[in-house]
Image: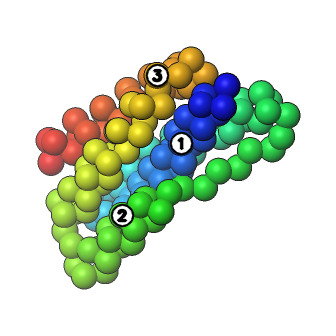
Amino acid sequence: MAFETSAVRTVIEVLHDGERGFQSLGEELKNSQAKSFFLEESATRRRFATELERALGTEEGEDVKEGGTASGTLHRAWGELKAKMGGSDHTLLETAEQGEDAAKMPMKRSSKTATCQPRWQRYYGNSRRTSLLLMTR
C-alpha cells in the first residue's frame, strides 16, 4: 500500500509538471494551432492530476494536494529562458519534447501499480499523441 501511494504521488507530481510546462510553453508559442494544443494538454494534465488526488484522498481519508518536482521546475525555467531569449516555436517544441521524455521513466515505473494503472494508460495515450505531434514539426 505504501508503495502504491508513493507511486500515485509521483504520477501526480509529474502530471503537475506537465500541466505547468505545457501552460508555460503554450503561452509563448506563436503558432495558434500549437498554442491551442499545448493549452488543451495542460488542462488535460490538470484534470488527470485532480482525479488522482481525489482518488488518493478518498483512499487515505485526507485532502491530497501535490506539487511538481524540482527537475520539472528547472526544466520550465529553462524553457521560459529560451522563450525570453527569442527562441522559435521549433526550439520551444523541442523543449516540450525533452520534458515529455524526462517524464516517461517515473511514469512508467509508477504505472506498474494497480492503483494508477488505468489512469496511466489514459495519460500515456495523450503523451504519445503529444510526442507524435512534436516529431512532425
Q: Which one is in front in this view, the residue at disc 3 or the one at disc 2?
A: 3
Query: Where is residue 59 drawn, in percent x and y?
Result: 77, 27
What sort of colour scheme is used for the picture? rainbow
Above or below: residue 65 compared with residue 119 = below
Mark 1 Cα within 10 Å, few/some/many (few <14, many 20+)? many
Marked residue nearer the N-terminal end (1 or 2): 1
Q: Is mark 2 on a helix, strand or loop?
A: helix
The residue most toward the right is 61
Q: Is label 1 in contact with label 2 (beta carbons under 8 Å)?
A: no
Dot 1 falls on a residue whose secondary structure is helix
Residue found 39% across the figure and 72% down from its top: 77
**Residue drawn at (53%, 42%) of the image:** 10
Q: Residue 97: x, y in percent?
A: 26, 49
The amino acid beneath tag 1 is: Thr
The mark that comes first in sequence, 1 or 3, is 1
Say which of 20 and 75 sits in front. 75
For marks 3 and 2, the one nearer the N-term is 2
Secondary structure type for disc 3: loop
* Quadrant containing the N terminus in the rendered view: top right
Residue 114 in the image: state x and y as whole percent. 56, 17
Dot 2, how many residues are within 10 Å of its Cα: few (below 14), some (14-19), or many (20+)?
A: some
